[in-house]
Image (cartoon, coloured by chain):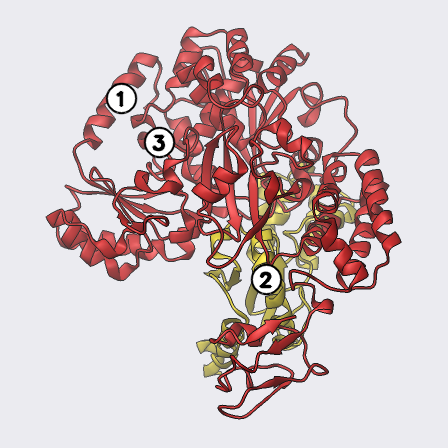
Chain colours: A yellow, B red
Amino acid sequence: MQEIEAIIERYGAERRHAISILQDIQARFHYLPKDAVLHVAARLRIPLIDLYGLATFYNSFSLTPRGEHVIQVCLGTACHLKGGTRLVEALERELGIREGEVTLDGRFSFKAVRCLGACALAPLVVIDGRYQPKMTQRKLTQIVARLRRVREPAEAAR
Amino acid sequence: MKIRTGEQLLMLERELRMAHDHKPCVRVCGGTGCRARGSEDVLARFQELLERKELGGSIELKFTGCHGLCERGPLVSIAPSEIFYQSVEADDVAAIVEETLEHDRVIERLLASDPVTGTRVRREQELPFYRRQHRIVLRLNGVIDPTDIREYLAFGGYRALAKTLENLTPEEVIEIMERSGLRGRGGAGFPTGKKWRLARAAKGTTKYVVCNGDEGDPGAFMDRSLLEGNPHSVLEGMIIGAYAIGATRGIIYVREEYPLAVGTLQVALEQAREYGFLGKAIFGSPLSFDIEIVRGAGAFVAGEETALIAAVEGRVSEPRQRPPYPVERGVWGCPTVINNVETWANVPVIIERGPEWFASLGTATSKGTKIFSLVGKIRNTGLVEIPMGMTVRELVEEIGGGPPPSREIKAVQIGGPSGGCLPKDLFDLPIDYESLVEAGAMMGSGGLIVMDDRTCMVDVARYFMDFLRDESCGKCLPCREGTNRMYELLTRICEGRATESDLDLLEELAQVVKETSLCGLGQTASNPVLTTLRYFRPEYEAHVRERRCPAGVCKALIHYVIAADRCTGCLACVSPCPSQAITGQLKQPHVIDQSRCLKCGLCLEVCQFGAVEVV
């Protein structure tokens, strides 16, 4: 909660900063934890429903935690024309989840996003923040398989 | 160090230029495309090598904004010889340092080649991609280091601001804008000078200028590249605008999805304050003005000006009825001028070179240049700036280099989800606001997506409708419901379940949504549908009457088959097939079991002999 407090302090506990505060919380935790949102509502003295409204209206926010590995498939126009949708389908098959979900073991989540502005690389997939240009279904399933095998060092030691 | 007078500024400019001249300079492109291809590693290798060879003092190394030719990244240009290297990898750096920098020799294999003549080209300007462009706004993109204000100053940066504050009245500035004929680059094309005049006349003690950097169109990255590559040109434009309308506060609304642009802007704002271009008594004048950044949280509709205001105020980004227009009641109820990134960046150039010069570029009603992001089924994907009035054909064929090998361009889509598709027999259309609207498209913010014979126009319309129904804010019924119903109809067509009457219904619905929606999003949402119906009706009819997708895209209407005469029986497609639909033995033609086939297209992707066909 201290961290949340520090984020609120950065802007001031005013309603007009609600979006910025939520953005920073999202950036820190990669989703909006329930407690954090409750705390912000109390500190900014605004109804929870208003924050919920913001959190569900804007694409940047997520109310569920993400997976250990985050995969974004670009579905901007150029990527769509060059087969982005097929990559989404391939991932759905490979991971056994729908777009926007997290695998049961919490290891993968994937989302389709609208244009990352790197159209020369279409179709583009971003895996854990790394741009993977000119993606194919084959390459993508291979990358996922590799990530599945490689455990985080800390986790492997346990 | 605060700059107080135009004279001080000029002296500093001269000083900075002297320090930079004569020295060879290596410019590594730090645009998004090149970074994704590893230009950061290229830069790091240069740094390391120059240091090791103790060349750091005699050779300048810069990490610049987007050069434009994203297709061939990472790009490296070398001054003063103007050698232009493409697809440079970290491992090429040693050779570049040794050969080119130390011994003045050109490395042939890293040069670009002219697509027509096939000869290797040494200089950027010799490539048709650059030769046919007219770079005014982008002139310093790829030249300067965007994180160092001194670079912008060395090229005459903030000179226009000094001229404005020392020699021009706000009235005169507005007059210059009007005479220049500059129109909004965000899409609608409202005359900038007129907007400023209205805001100046509006009553209010506090006024705002806002930069709309909520570039939401899929397939567009002009504003991003400009903010990342030359942020001060935008700031300078905004400060001049603030003086003209009497604003004290500025806001840059920029997508959070562009973290690099946000970071570059933050640095630029700090440096502008340090030099006294923002803050109190700018250039010793009575103008006090500062700018803050507001990060957009991801909502396409926020590009609409009243929805943007709601987002800036921390609310859900929903548009409202106009009038009152933002020039009267904008941010926090104050008179507000909202201009697009590219519009602001044009302002200093117009002040510096004069409205007559600017008005001499372009057509009768569309002046100056326009930046496009040229993407899709085209050889040279990238960022281009062309004079208004250039034809679609020149842009696509000469600058874009035409279609990928053995394909044929069928159409271009201009203006993002609000725009329309233009067929190739309209490619002689000049690119200006009026011609595009007349043809059913619009200028939009500058996304230009090229489509070839493997692109299904019904699928494209469905794609945009999916985007729009998702991004519709839901406030007004025609847009909220209309986009969903149109999406359903388009899906039915793509799946071969539609009837003739569905086509009529689609057309009628599109018209209703266009006429009755509250804001620009809904009013233009029908454009992709209406233009594809207008120019590509036979494609729709093939889906409906013959249950056939001529481009071979719509999944429900296609089959994958293996051509026995071309299949070498290599087994490459057999094991990857996710549904084990392919059977066959080594050196025997394989067969796809249609009842098991998921139509994922993986076999087509892996086959090296072109034996998999879509029918």
Q: Residue at x 46, y 33 (%)?
A: B386
Label 2 resides on the chain identified as: A
Q: CA distance from mark 2 to mark 1?
A: 50 Å
Q: Are marks 2 and 1 on the same chain?
A: no
Decide if residue A81 is on the left or right side of residue A134.
Answer: right
Three-letter code for the amino acid on which mark 3 is drawn: Ile
Residue B168 percent coordinates (x, y): 46, 7
Task: Name the element at disc 2.
Answer: helix
Residue placed most toward the observer, B467 or A72: B467
Three-letter code for the amino acid on which mark 2 is drawn: Gly
Q: Are marks 1 and 3 on the same chain?
A: yes
Q: Mark 1 highlights which residue?
A: B12
Residue A155 percent coordinates (x, y): 49, 79
Q: Mark 2 highlights which residue?
A: A84
Decide if residue B403 is on the left or right side of residue B298.
Answer: left
User: Mark 1 or mark 3: which comes first in sequence?
Assistant: 1
Q: Mark 3 highlights which residue?
A: B149
Residue placed most toward the observer, B501 or B186: B501
Q: CA distance from mark 1 to mark 3?
A: 12 Å
* Residue B262 can be seen, yes or no: no
Q: CA distance from mark 2 to mark 3?
A: 39 Å
Task: Name the element at disc 1.
Answer: helix
Decide if residue B124 is on the left or right side of residue B445.
Answer: left
Residue B397 percent coordinates (x, y): 47, 44
Q: Residue at x 51, y 76 (%)?
A: B606
